[in-house]
Image (tube, rainbow, N blue to C red):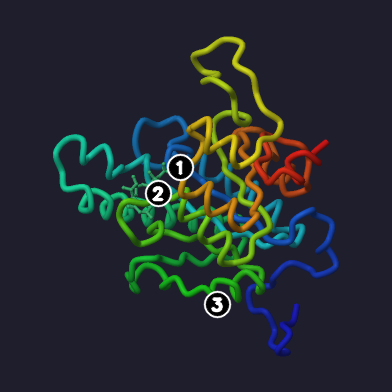
Amino acid sequence: MTDADGLRDQDGGPDTALRGSARYRRILLKLSGEALLGERQYGVDPKFCAFVAQQVAAVHATGVEIGIVVGGGNIFRGLAAAARGMDRATGDYIGMLATVMNGLALQDAIERVGVPVRVMSAIAMNEVAEPYIRRRAVRHLEKGRVAVFVAGTGNPYFTTDTAAALRAVEIGAEVLLKATKVDGVYDADPMTVPGARRYDRLEYTDLLRDQLKVMDGAAVSLCMENDLPIVVFDLNGQDNIARVAFGEPVGTLIAGPAAAGARA
Ligand code: UDP
């Protein structure tokens, strides 16, 4: 494969002939830290990382450009530490560092399945990750590399959901895929409330008004202002990332009135 500037792509990016078969050209996948727990109580489950990596590779092989924002809740949450008396900003910085560890684990897993990856950090740590530079991130994607964005937004008092919305908008992703443990947004917690109802689609304003606890308000507002659709889906379902990327009605679509109403 050659670039527009005539250089050979050393990483062997996806075949351009395959592009166009998926619904989205560029996606931003948000993986919570908890998702990486797999069967564990703490830390990262290599088996689950491998499962995610295989799904990412399958989507990548179709030519979809993939950015990933990873959380840190499996290791550290600033808010929980603040509740125990720690300075909030300090706790948040520890939380951001936790996302870096997750990102490196994910990089390893994705590389093992033969897909080129770059980790880009919002907090400078040049020995372990590239600094996040928007134009460079876009270049990585264009060259067929998966970009894993770590250290959240680089600022305390934010979440990695907001970082995901921010990076998605910055890199021009067409959709934000929020991977969770349940298959969409419900009107009550389906783990504890029998008969809880799942929504196929919602508008941003429903999420903000009803405080459905899917994403924080800052993240939803950023998506709404930039007309960026969100799909909340179950990461554990086989091939679910690919199914969402191909526009199948998986999970819950959150969008503006026109798009939210148009979904089959
Ligand atoms: N965090 C932060 N700023 C950011 C993103 C994250 O301070 O822009 C901190 C915050 O303390 C948060 C922790 O990093 O609790 C881990 O991120 P998050 O809770 O969003 O991870 P997830 O729930 O997705 O695993």
Residue of label 1: 216
Q: Which residue is located at x 31 percent, y 42 percent? A: 77
* Secondary structure of residue under mark 1: loop
Pointer 2: residues within 10 angstroms few (<14), some, or many (20+)? many
Check the image and report above or below for 66 versus 246: below
* Secondary structure of residue under mark 2: loop
x, y (%) of residue 22?
80, 54
Q: Earlier in the sequence, mark 3 or mark 2?
A: 3
Alpha-carbon distance for marks 3 and 2? 23 Å
x, y (%) of residue 191?
51, 18
- 174 or 242, nearer to the observer: 174
- Amino acid beneath label 2: Thr
Alpha-carbon distance for marks 3 and 1? 27 Å
Q: Which residue is located at x 80 percent, y 70 percent? A: 16
- Amino acid beneath label 1: Asp
Residue projecting furthest to the bottom: 6
Q: Earlier in the sequence, mark 3 or mark 1?
A: 3
Residue of label 2: 159
